[in-house]
Image: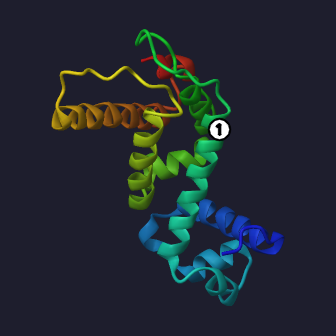
Amino acid sequence: MNKKDPRVQQTFEMLQGGFTSLIQAMPLEQITIKKLTEASLINRTTFYLHFSDLQDFILQYCETIFTKWTEISNHAVPTPLHRSLDETYPGLVNLLEHIKQEKIMYSCLLVEHRLPQFTIQLNEWMKKYTNQGFGVIQPAPHFDDYEREVREVHILSGTIGAIIWWVKHSFPITSQRLARN
């Protein structure tokens, strides 16, 4: 898909809007290309010009979300090393604010109708940005590779779980407080 062509970009935006409205109304298993193209007000031929199937579209839909997350996180002031766990990660605060602004979409993606592809890409993105965009916690030199990996999985699972909890419970605490915790 040539994302620089304005017509292609407009088509993709229409499909994104249609998909977002469908995922709010029904589980992923019930979404078909026919339903997606009808909700997006485009014909199926146009869809197939850009995507091979629904999974191809969902993959690009998720990639677009994480590209946006990268832009949001990159606008934060980078923190080279955290001196204290009480410090907030500016990139994470910005990201949480974005999630809060787009609460309906993220409620569908993270809580109501979890997309497997989104979850996989979320884990990969969080792994990358935990050590880049959000700031780096100084590694403990006494951990071997397995211990370091287990620690990373534990931290990522906790962070993702906390974000899901936050969305599920309609943002009961501020994004700054969640990022700090």
- Above or below residue 5? Residue 145 is above
Q: Residue at left 41%, top 49%?
A: 124
Q: Nearer the viewer, residue 3 or 111?
A: 3
Pinpoint residue 42: horizontal percent, then vertical percent: 73, 80
Q: Residue furthest bottom?
A: 45
State the residue position of label 1.
72
Pinpoint residue 44: horizontal percent, then vertical percent: 65, 87
Pinpoint residue 176: horizontal percent, then vertical percent: 55, 18
Q: Residue at left 23%, top 32%?
A: 148
Question: Circle 1 sits in a helix, a strand or a loop, which is it?
Answer: helix
Task: Judge from the rendering whether residue 122 lies leftward or rightward of residue 46; answer left or right.
Answer: left
- Above or below residue 169? Residue 28 is below
The quarter holding residue 69 reads top right
Image quarter of the C terminus: top left
**Label 1 crowd (10 A; few <14 / some 14-19 / many >=20):** some
Pinpoint residue 157: horizontal percent, then vertical percent: 32, 37
The quarter holding residue 168 reads top left
Q: Nearer the viewer, residue 26 or 47?
A: 47
Q: Nearer the viewer, residue 26 or 28?
A: 28
Three-letter code for the amino acid on which mark 1 is drawn:
Ile
Q: Nearer the viewer, residue 149 or 52?
A: 149
Q: Residue at left 49%, top 52%?
A: 109
Q: Residue furthest right?
A: 6
Image quarter of the N terminus: bottom right
